[in-house]
Image (cartoon, rainbow, N blue to C red):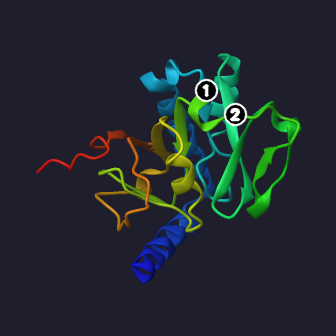
Amino acid sequence: MAAEKAAWRERFRAARRALPAEARAAASAAVCARVLALPEVRTARTVHAFWPLANEVDLRPALHALRERGVVVALPVVAGPRRLVHRAFEGEGALRAGRWGTREPAPSAPDVRPHQIDVVLVPGLAFGRDGSRLGYGGGFYDAFLAQTPALRVGVGGAASLVASLPTEPHDARLDAVVTDAEVVRAPRRGEAAGP
């Protein structure tokens, strides 16, 4: 399974690298619009998101829009192996350099507990219409999603969406996937996909 996942990861990393910057920017804008229009996001009090890594969908416009609506936006902070803590996003000027080239809230930012989160916007290299997800291999989001009842929404470009992905028992399932082309609702956790 590890070799199969590694092959999938390389495939989707290569596809991301090949996407022109203008196309990535247009896809990011479309994803932000679709995320902000989700009924669950429109009614959320707390949304967990992520700061973009190179070639990832850029959710920053959505993060700012959510804050303007009065929504608490939480960002992850790596706190150890497979362990994230979550702090409130208080603006770009309040962020500091994090691991792997991302930005994260400083220790002085308010903590956000997993049970307080209504929606988690989940990064990944690829997403399945069945709720499967291919992350980066660190297990951080699998561990985090096991701790929260929040709606789990994968976000990525249309090219990152496939029918299904190889999974293992510890891999967290998603409730929905948002791309620049569509919103896909996955079968409820614990239910099988339709025929």
Report the residue marked by disc 1: 46
**Can you say whether 34 is above or below 98 in the image?**
above
Q: Amino acid at mark 1?
A: Thr
Query: Picture coordinates of residue 76 (x, y %)?
Result: 69, 46
**Can you say whether 7 is above or below 138 in the image?**
below
Q: Residue at x 55, y 55 (%)?
A: 143
Q: Residue at x 43, y 74 (%)?
A: 5
Residue 159 falls in image quadrant: bottom left
Query: Quarter holding the N terminus?
Result: bottom left
Report the residue marked by disc 2: 112
Viewer-closest of 99 and 16: 99
**Badge 2 or badge 1: first in the primary sequence:** 1
Task: Bin the neighbour count of mark 1 within 10 Å (Cα to Cα): few under 14, some 14-19, many 20 and up.
Answer: many
Q: CA distance from mark 2 to mark 1?
A: 9 Å
Query: Picture coordinates of residue 122 (x, y %)?
Result: 53, 47
Q: Residue at x 50, y 46 (%)?
A: 155
Q: Amino acid at mark 2?
A: Val
Left or right for 17, reference 90: left
Query: Picture coordinates of residue 6 (x, y %)?
Result: 48, 78
Disc 2 is placed on an element classified as: loop
Left or right for 94, reference 53: right
Disc 1 is placed on an element classified as: strand
Report the mark closest to the observer, 2 or 1: 2
Viewer-closest of 97 and 143: 143
Left or right for 16, reference 100: left
Query: Picture coordinates of residue 176 (x, y %)?
Result: 38, 41
Disc 2 to disc 1: CB gap under 8 Å? yes
